[in-house]
Image: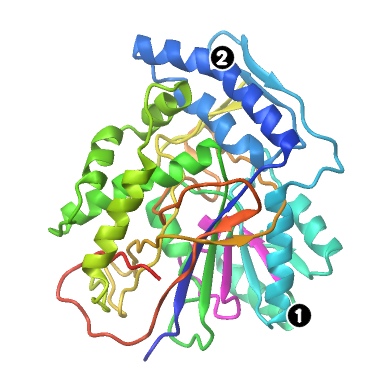
Amino acid sequence: FPLPDYTEIPVEVPMAPEQVMLYETLKEQLKEELQERLVQGDKSLLSAYLYALLFWPDSPRRAKVVNDPRTGETVAAIPGLPEEFVGPKEKAIVELCQQEKAEGRKVLLLCLQTDTLDIQPEWKRMLEEAGLKTAVLRAAPNKRESWVEKQVQAGIDVIISHPKKVETGIDLLDFPTIVWMSPHYSVYTVLQASRRSWRIGQTQPVKVYYFAYADTIQEQALYLVAAKVAAALRVNGDTIADDSLAELDGITGNDIVATLARIVTGDTELNTQSLQNAFAEANASLRQANAIIGDYEIVDDEPEVVTSNGVQTIPQQVPLFSEQSRSNGHRTNGKSATMPVVTNGRHTHHSQFDGNDHTYKNGNQPEPGTNEKQLAPLSSLGAGSAKCLPPRRRGASGPPVPRPRLLMNLP
């Protein structure tokens, strides 16, 4: 049964000036502490500090206070923005949902911050004020499918959910547009949740959007996915024509948190131009291949996130975006999986919008969701409106491949 086109679209949104000012203040306050921890080889607090930087831009109306969990000492603190402030990412996502409604397409909005810092009610309010009928998925696992059916019958426009709640056991054919409002850490979760509506029986093209703030550590996380892509290529026995991705993988190693900390402190700089060239060359060499993936699955360990003195720790992997791939109907361990496909270049898009963080309960189990994943590359940044990488589309045809392959295609 042929599946419709599947398109993944990473979107970079520039922050508002007042966001930038507070973000840079927080970054400077944390920089010295991060440097000291790196020198000491103490990684216990790196994730907590980086978590604040990664996710404060998505919850700008909330003050951020970062404490040392062991001493209680305040390491960094910034105030929140006024309640009437609407972030660029928030505006962009609301506008996107309105556009999708106008085209007769329902939207699944994936939100990571659903526990202590639950921002789902905030998003529901904003979407409803924009004329979009919205519901938050809170039903128990065995009732989720029937709950979704009732919402569809009631004429819902947008369902907000944590990605963990929809990663398995439910098909969402009525929601051909999926929007990630902020990066996620788990490769497995991203691959599974992003394909909830790309299933047998789907008749509409599926579009998956990944949002991130430009010129922030979120953007750096996007570049680091190249290391994951390169590693995946090597695991699968494939090679690329340029060694820039391998070099970046070497920079990152197995410790993405430490790498991000070095980026924040200025000890490490990513050669993004080289990265773009590497992807362009890899895409050129693989452009003619149309079929992807037989069976493939990536499962990352579920890291721990704890809350201490108001500071949340981030899993030991950064949020990475997944660029698309296909499975041709094959499954591994009962689960379909996709592989990243990378695009090069982008087009413009307006915006303004927000997000926030999430925690794990009892210090070890993630509230529906936590972890990271793959992504699409970024082109050079510039000032102006949100930048959206051109979507990469894949048709339904193409013979199955005898073993997993990762393809990166330019649009």
| Residue 370: % across, % down | 49, 45
Q: How is the image coloured?
A: rainbow
At mark 2, the secondary structure is: loop
- Is 371 above or below relative to 175? above
| Residue 362: % across, % down | 54, 33
Residue at (55, 16) in percent of width and height? 69
Q: Which residue is mark 1?
A: 155
Mark 2 or 1 closer to N-term? 2
Q: Which residue is mark 2?
A: 68
Q: Amino acid at mark 2?
A: Asp
Quadrant, the N terminus: bottom left
Residue at (56, 47) in percent of width and height? 382
From the viewer's perspective, tell me whether residue 25 is left or right of residue 53.
right
Query: Can residue 221 be seen here?
Result: yes
| Residue 250: % across, % down | 23, 36
Q: Residue furthest bottom?
A: 1
- Is 1 above or below relative to 320? below
At mark 1, the secondary structure is: loop
Name the one closer to the observer, 293 or 151.
293
Residue at (63, 17) in percent of width and height? 76
Query: Can residue 310 be seen here?
Result: no
Q: Amino acid at mark 1?
A: Gly
From the viewer's perspective, tell me whether residue 103 is left or right of residue 269.
right
Q: Which residues are magenta?
A: 158-179
Q: Which quadrant holds residue 92?
A: bottom right
| Residue 214: % across, % down | 57, 44
| Number of residues whose C-alpha sits closer than 10 Å to that of mark 2, classed few (under 14), some (14–19) or many (20 or more) | some
Name the one closer to the observer, 59 or 73.
59
Residue at (77, 37) in percent of width and height? 61
